[in-house]
Every structure is written in C-alpha cells, then in structure tokens.
Image: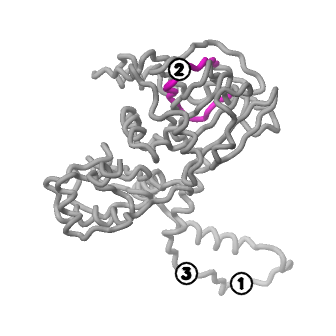
Amino acid sequence: MLSLDLLGGLSAQTFLRDYWQKKPLLIRQAIPGFTGLLTPDELLVLAGQNDCTARLVRQQGDGWQLRHGPFRRSAFPALKSRQPWTVLVQELNHHLRSAEDLLQRFSFIPHARLDDLMVSLATAGGGVGPHFDSYDVFLLQGMGERHWQISTQTDLTLIDELPLKILRHFTPEQEWVLSPGDMLYLPPHCAHNGVAVGLCMTYSIGFRAPSAQEIATQFLIYLQDRLQLNGVYADPDLNLQEHPAQIGKPMLEKVAGMINQIHWDKHDIAEFTGCYLTEPKAHVFFSPPETMPSHARFCRQVRKAGVRLAPQSLMLCYDKRFFLNGEPVDLTGEYESLIQLADTRQLAGAGLSPACLDWLYTCHEAGFVLIVEALRKSG
C-alpha cells in the first residue's frame, strides 16, 4: 500500500479505514514548506471580485457581525486592528491554478465527494467561533499560526439569533497550534474552534454531503423533466355521489394508477447522480473564449499543448458513461481519453481522434475546457 506524505505516512487505505468519517487526525508537516497560495493583500483583492463568494466576520465583544461580498478594500479594517476579524473566500480553485493543483493532492477521495477549497484570513484573535460542519474537512495551515480546539461532544445545540452557527456549549477535548504546512482532518459533526495566534491564513478542503431531502428533491425534478406518461383522467363509470365535495375512492384509485406509471431503475439513478453531482452551483458561470479559433487551428493547438478542464468544470463517470457540468457526454469509444480528462483534469493532445477533437472544440466554445497553451499565456 502506497503511503502518502500528505497523511503523515499513512496509506490512503489506512486513512479511509481508520479515520475517514470516524475520528480526527493531526498531521504535522503534511506539506513541508507550505506557506499558502496567495498573500493577504491578494486575497482581499479577490474578495472584491463579483464572481467571488466572500464573507467578512467581525467579533464585537460577545456578538458577531456577518457581511457578504463582494467588498471594497475599504470594507476591511486594518490587518493590525485590535478588533479581531476574518474574511473567508470560497472556491479558491475557481480562481487560482495552484488551488486546483492543491486539490488534486486529495484525489484519494473520489472527486464526486469534493466540494471546494476555501481560504480564510484572520487577524490576531480572529475566528468564526466554536461550530461544527456536516461534512469532512481538511484544515491546512498556510501563513501564520492558528490555535485549534476540538471536541467529539454530542451536544450540538446552536445559539439562537446569531448570523453564524455557533455552539451554545463547547467543551474542548484536544488542542494544538498549527504552523505552516500542518494539517488537521475533522470528520462530520466534530466540534471545533480555530483562533488566529497572529495574522494567519488557513486553507479548508471541504467535501460535499447533500442531505437525503436534497437528493430526493433533485431526483424528482430530474424525473419531472424526463417523464412522458400517457392518458388523461377519465371516469366513464362515474356514479352519483351523496356529497359532491367529496373525493371518492374510485377517483383516488385512478389517480394512484396514473402515478404508478412512474418507474425508475439503476440506469435512471446513475444518470441522475452523474448529472446532479456535476451540475455547477447556481452562482457559477463559464467564460467562452473572447476569440474562438477556427476548428483547424484549435486542433493544431490541442495536439501540441493539450487541454485542461476549466476551473469551474465538474466531470465524473459511471462505468463508461461520462458527465460534464450537469449533462451526459455523448461520445462513445473514447474511454481512455475521457477518463484521463476526468481523473487528472487535463488531457494530452497527441493521438486524439477527430471525434474527440470535435467534442473538445464544442466544450471550448462553451468555456468548459481551456487550451493549455492559452493558460500559459494568461499566466
């Protein structure tokens, strides 16, 4: 079993068996020399962009203030402010190539479970209070140090009427100070509280955990868009009722019969799951190329440099069926190319078939894939 330095020498199999969704794990120097992916000033600039999801948390005595971005630079207090504050930016992997590369180091967890990379900048004493998450998270320390307290307590009652989900009672059981390169894994519902020792930045690798209600609701919506039931309600055998306002049993039986026409199988579940898990979030948009190359030029560029999935793109597969950004991929006989693109988010151009190049051209036109050469030119 191959060990991973990222997991302190544990094999991926051992981590999944003994820790994943079971108990916390502290890993000193998970990434030696790691100090972060951007500076505080760069993060504050990013938090001001319209396509960035950012939050600003300020502590005011025993109270908390939460604001949503985008923010002007003047919205942030001084980095040496006596009043602690924290800014959090979601989906850093949509904005930085280095953030995409960092997430690839966590590929021992299926891509279908990955949510995003969030980064938080906190001034001395800053944090978001003791809380818990309903999903797994790796907390990787970048610049500075953060003091973490964790608890496996079962009392997860929250304080009412706060803009943040903060635990009413928090009893720490373990605590550490994490330095650059250190990482803490926390399973779902593990209570934790992180406080910046000084100015610091922490990178949170989060994993999605949709509720049963959400999955069922989205599946019904999926079915609704694909249902084609025959017939209309009819009652040629209608009998006179004593109460015209009453819904009679014969009507209920007819309605039940119509509903019972709805069926699904494992294929429907697989198709739904692939579309659902790759569907971009509502606030995510794609940027088609400003100047679309001709098909011939595109093919030459791709054969020379290859392509990468756009940072916002999500690609998964079931068996030999692939899904990209909420839609099935209608391209047969290209498994090796497609699985490489889905697994590594990049694809070498040499040897690609004309059919695959045609499909990639359509994806490039929609902003779903990028030419690697174009990425290099844009930095």
User: 70 or 93, which lies in front?
Assistant: 70
Q: Which residue is mark 2?
A: 24
Residue 299, compared with residue 103, is above or below; it is below
**Disc 1 to disc 2: CB gap under 8 Å:** no
Q: Which residue is mark 1?
A: 238
User: 104 or 160, which lies in front?
Assistant: 104
Q: Is residue 215 left or right of residue 114?
A: right
Q: What residue range appears in magenta?
A: 131-151
Report the residue at 32% width, 48% height from top: 342
User: Which quadrant is home to the N terminus?
Assistant: top left
Question: First in sequence: mark 1 or mark 2?
Answer: 2
Q: Residue furthest bottom?
A: 236
User: 238 or 45, which lies in front?
Assistant: 45
Judge whether residue 193 can be spotted in this image. Answer: no
Distance from the alpha carbon under mark 3 to that under mark 2: 56 Å
Distance from the alpha carbon under mark 1 to that under mark 2: 65 Å
Q: Position of residue 255 (x, y in %)?
A: 64, 71
Amino acid, disc 3: Gly
Is 132 inside the magenta-drawn segment? yes
Q: Secondary structure at mark 1?
A: loop
Q: Position of residue 88 (x, y in %)?
A: 60, 38
Q: Secondary structure at mark 2?
A: loop
Q: Which residue is mark 3?
A: 231
As drawn, the label of residue 57 is none
Amino acid, disc 1: Leu
Q: Position of residue 104 (x, y in %)?
A: 36, 37
Question: First in sequence: mark 3 or mark 2?
Answer: 2
Q: Residue furthest right?
A: 243
Is 79 inside the magenta-drawn segment? no
